Image (cartoon, grey):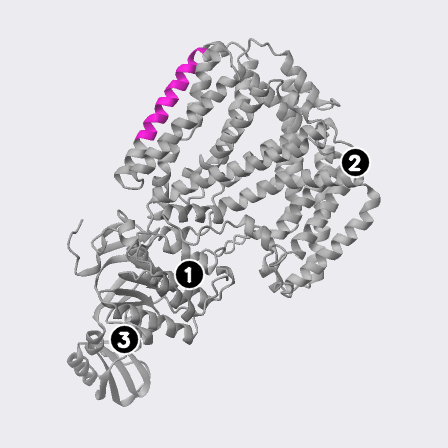
């Protein structure tokens, strides 16, 4: 229903938005049009407005394609018919209760197989034929419904055949998804008779085996022992301080898994492509593919850590709440493990970018971002900070354990998007930007003052209620000051216009989480002592 | 903060708690003396787990007071939890941990953790240190939870339905652990259970809860002595349970009926005589009979 709603919304609203913005969705090179419209903007216009205009043009150019991509992936996931198991936290567990229904395995299989194919065709056709969307050649997905159908069938085969090995299944599934996304435009009709029946046969066998509890005794113990040892931080033989034990706990229960996923998603596609290039003497990647790969790599840790930070589901909370720890002693390790995960993820991304250099003309991509190395370094440092930020800034919404409060991060993102669109629309009617630019520094100063006031109140209450130890507060404030100084130094690297320095600096201060961290122990107290 | 050790490990006074429209705890008051085994019995939904959650600070009282070793579990959770070992009804141990990791992690928080004792318990319970918690059976899970609750020799052991869903062998292991804990000087055990024969075996003091209220509390011996099972014989067969005032419950058929009364023995005997019955035998009631009698009385 949600996907149908999205299709309907785009069908009705998107052409009107394009007409309003003067964007031609039938342009053969929409990204070029975005670039041209950005260039046409006066350099005298405020940078925030230009950013807003570019973002809205990007939305018009790429929004339908990205949404189509996400919804079709959603269809693939839906017809694997897996769900999150609350007990084991396996994100792709086939519901065993289905097997208690008086239906044969064949019926179950054909229902999911044919239903999935039909749904894929319907949604694919809806996106391609109902919405006049621009043709973005990032993955060439517009050209191939068969590729999507094959992906869905293979996803079913992998999800059901490898149900007994959730970690292995996730890795192979991700590798398959990325392979398809890289090669979907070259998948043709003649390969369907091979992939579809093979995938269907595997899927049926997997469903059958799942139903009768087979393959559950086998493990990957010895072949993957090294990999398991690397991804599972065993920790010391004895934890000296409790804080060390808690960092280990947070890493193992949550952060480590997502860090591992980020590292795998960053390195695996590039390494596979490099090996394929060496073995099969493939051509270097095209400019568009290099651009797409680079964008994927630099935004991957940000996206994964945002999902982690916005996720309300943390396992083992009941176990943790009866440990002799203050709320602050539970919160600080979450910040530390987020920092560790960020660091490791970005090391992997930088390694992947180094591999990308061997796959095509990376120098051109880098020059396209900025001709100045200092600016590129500043962007990377900014993204590293943002990655850590998105992982921790929403903790205060997640910790109370209330699902409505936990939706705040998503609502904030929607509000941010709406704000950008409103900015852009206001600018169309002119005349408002100059007064706004005059009051903006004052407005930001006011927000910074509110931030400091809230931080003071939150830390004071946390200290009074002994939710935070004084040492922890001092440590975090020290880190906050160091972070802000580092970011301001990074800002200096890019030499912004003189009149923008003050508002940008205030923006940096606003970005580094302070009050929200102070509220975390209070938020946790709402859950711990409900 | 109390500087001298309070005589009671747990003090609950006038505790009330609602969940929506349901009154889960209704002015509950009880005291658990140090060095005693306190058994809390009650039907499903009586409020046992809710009470235990208040002792751990997981729930905040809406009215009333909760003190564990003189500390408020909500205001000072560390002071309470560092002296309390807890085994939950749901055995919610991290499924991703191995047994040896669980021990190492838990040991970090308790300075009094006894490595040798923990290892001895692990071997006694037959737990594989390399086994993941998710692969353990229900009984092994309970043993692992009990192991980490006992290994640092807590002053207070809180067990929520420790025997629930376990086979007799595992239940025996848990009971032995409880008895050993009590044998150590000054340690206290507070456990809730449906299995009344086990409560009878190990508890020194008991409380019975129904519909969020404590209806009965005292030492086990006093409770049993205050309840009597009267075998009544009627001259004429009774089609329905005779109305005998002063009894908690009356069961049987025909001419012979069994009544459980609470301290009002003479009144019950007189009332039975008024409806044509006479007491032919009198015995002490078992805890099971007392519980069922109170459950029936509260339902009416």
Verify CB contact (< 8 Å) between mark 3 and mark 2. Answer: no
Q: For the residue labelled by badge 1, is the local secondary structure a helix, a strand or a loop?
A: loop
Verify CB contact (< 8 Å) between mark 3 and mark 1. Answer: no
Front position in the image: A162 or A32: A162
Instruction: Report crowding for label 2: few under 14, some 14 to 19, many 20 or more residues within 10 A (C-alpha).
Output: few
Instruction: List x then y, in percent, for residue A123.
Output: 70, 40
Give the quarter of the image for residue A277.
top right
Where does the magenta region start and end?
A: A438-456
Residue A65 seen anywhere in this rendered image of the structure: no
Q: For the residue labelled by badge 2, is the local secondary structure a helix, a strand or a loop?
A: loop
Q: Is residue B229 magenta?
A: no
Residue A369, relative to residue A302: is it above or below?
Answer: above
Q: Are labels 3 and 1 assigned to the same chain?
A: yes
Earlier residue among tags 3 and 1: 1
Give the residue drawn at x 46%, y 47%.
Answer: A314
Main SS category, magenta section: helix
Please tell me the numbered disc located at residue A159: none
Residue labelled with disc 3: B290
Instruction: List x then y, in percent, for residue A356.
Output: 67, 32
Verify CB contact (< 8 Å) between mark 1 and mark 2. Answer: no
Quarter containing the N terminus of chain A: top right
Residue labelled with disc 1: B91
Front position in the image: A422 or A257: A257
Instruction: Report crowding for label 1: few under 14, some 14 to 19, many 20 or more residues within 10 A (C-alpha).
Output: many
Instruction: Report crowding for label 3: few under 14, some 14 to 19, many 20 or more residues within 10 A (C-alpha).
Output: many
Residue labelled with disc 2: A282
Q: For the residue labelled by badge 3, is the local secondary structure a helix, a strand or a loop?
A: helix
Instruction: List x then y, in percent, for residue B43.
Output: 34, 67
Q: Are labels 3 and 2 assigned to the same chain?
A: no
């Amino acid at each position: 229903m949600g996907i149908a709603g999205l299709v309907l919304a785009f069908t009705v609203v998107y052409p009107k938005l394009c007409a309003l913005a003067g964007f031609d969705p039938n342009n053969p090179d929409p990204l070029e049009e975005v670039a041209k419209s950005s260039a046409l903007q006066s350099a005298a216009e405020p940078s925030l407005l230009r950013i807003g205009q570019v973002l809205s043009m990007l939305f018009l150019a790429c929004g339908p394609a990205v949404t189509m991509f996400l919804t079709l992936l959603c269809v693939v996931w839906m017809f694997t018919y897996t769900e999150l198991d609350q007990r084991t936290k396996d994100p792709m567990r086939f519901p065993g209760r289905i097997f208690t229904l008086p239906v044969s395995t064949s019926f179950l299989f054909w229902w999911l197989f044919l239903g999935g194919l039909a749904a894929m065709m319907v949604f694919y056709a809806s996106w391609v034929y109902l919405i006049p969307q621009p043709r973005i050649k990032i993955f060439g997905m517009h050209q191939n419904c068969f590729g999507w159908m094959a992906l869905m069938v293979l996803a079913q085969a992998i999800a059901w055949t490898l149900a007994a090995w959730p970690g292995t299944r996730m890795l192979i599934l991700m590798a398959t998804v990325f392979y398809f996304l890289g090669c979907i435009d070259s998948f043709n009709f003649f390969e369907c008779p091979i992939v579809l029946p093979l995938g269907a046969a595997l899927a049926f066998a997997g469903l059958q085996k799942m139903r009768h509890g087979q393959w559950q005794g086998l493990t990957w113990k010895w072949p993957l022992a090294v990999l398991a040892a690397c991804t599972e931080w065993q920790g010391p033989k004895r934890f000296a301080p409790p804080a060390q034990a808690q960092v280990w706990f947070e890493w193992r229960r949550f952060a480590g898994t997502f860090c591992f996923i980020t590292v795998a998603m960053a390195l695996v596609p590039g390494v596979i492509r490099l090996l394929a290039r060496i073995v099969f003497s493939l051509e270097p990647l095209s400019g568009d593919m290099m651009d797409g790969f680079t964008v994927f790599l630099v935004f991957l840790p940000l996206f994964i850590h945002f999902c982690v930070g916005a996720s309300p589901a943390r396992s083992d909370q009941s176990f943790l709440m009866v440990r002799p720890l203050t709320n602050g002693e539970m919160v600080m390790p979450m910040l530390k493990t987020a920092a560790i995960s960020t660091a490791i993820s970005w090391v992997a991304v930088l390694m992947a970018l180094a591999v990308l250099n061997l796959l095509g003309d990376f120098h051109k991509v880098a020059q396209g971002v900025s001709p100045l190395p200092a600016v590129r370094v500043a962007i990377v440092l900014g993204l590293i900070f943002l990655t850590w930020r998105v992982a921790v800034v929403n903790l205060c919404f997640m910790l109370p354990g209330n699902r409505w409060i936990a939706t705040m991060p998503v609502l904030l993102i929607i509000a941010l998007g709406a704000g950008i669109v409103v900015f852009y629309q206001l600018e169309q009617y002119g005349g408002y930007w100059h007064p706004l630019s005059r009051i903006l520094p004052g407005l930001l100063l006011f927000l910074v003052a509110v931030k400091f006031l809230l931080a003071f109140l939150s830390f004071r209450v946390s200290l009074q209620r002994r939710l935070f130890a004084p040492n922890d507060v001092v440590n975090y404030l020290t880190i906050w000051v160091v972070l802000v100084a580092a970011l301001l130094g990074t800002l200096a690297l890019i030499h912004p216009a003189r009149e923008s320095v003050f508002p940008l600096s205030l923006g940096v201060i606003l970005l580094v989480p302070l009050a929200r961290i102070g509220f975390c122990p209070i938020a946790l107290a709402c859950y711990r002592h409900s | 903060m109390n500087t001298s050790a309070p005589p009671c490990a747990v003090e609950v006074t006038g505790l009330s708690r609602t969940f929506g429209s349901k009154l889960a705890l209704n002015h509950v008051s009880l005291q658990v003396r140090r060095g005693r085994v306190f058994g809390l019995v009650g039907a499903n939904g009586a409020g046992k787990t809710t009470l235990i959650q208040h002792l751990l600070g997981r729930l905040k009282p809406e009215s009333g007071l909760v003190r564990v070793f003189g500390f408020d579990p909500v205001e000072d959770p560390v002071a309470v939890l560092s002296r309390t070992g807890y085994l939950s009804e749901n055995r919610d141990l991290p499924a991703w941990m191995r047994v040896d990791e669980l021990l190492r992690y838990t040991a970090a928080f308790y300075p009094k953790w006894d490595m040798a004792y923990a290892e001895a318990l692990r071997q006694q319970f037959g737990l594989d240190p390399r086994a993941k918690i998710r692969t353990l059976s229900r009984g092994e899970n309970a043993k692992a939870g009990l192991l980490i609750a006992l290994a640092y020799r807590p002053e207070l052991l809180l067990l929520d339905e420790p025997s629930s869903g376990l086979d007799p062998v595992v239940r025996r292991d848990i009971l032995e652990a409880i008895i050993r804990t009590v044998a150590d000087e000054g340690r206290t055990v507070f456990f809730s259970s449906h299995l009344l024969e086990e409560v009878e075996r190990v508890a020194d003091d008991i409380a019975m809860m129904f519909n969020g209220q404590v209806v009965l509390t005292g030492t086990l011996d006093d409770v049993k002595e205050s309840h009597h099972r009267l075998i009544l014989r009627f001259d004429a067969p009774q089609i329905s349970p005779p109305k005998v005032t002063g009894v908690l419950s009356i069961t049987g058929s025909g001419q012979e009926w069994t009544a459980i009364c609470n301290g009002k023995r003479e009144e019950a005997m007189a009332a039975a005589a008024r409806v044509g019955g006479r007491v032919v035998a009198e015995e002490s009631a078992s805890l099971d009979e007392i519980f069922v009698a109170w459950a029936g009385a509260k339902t009416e």
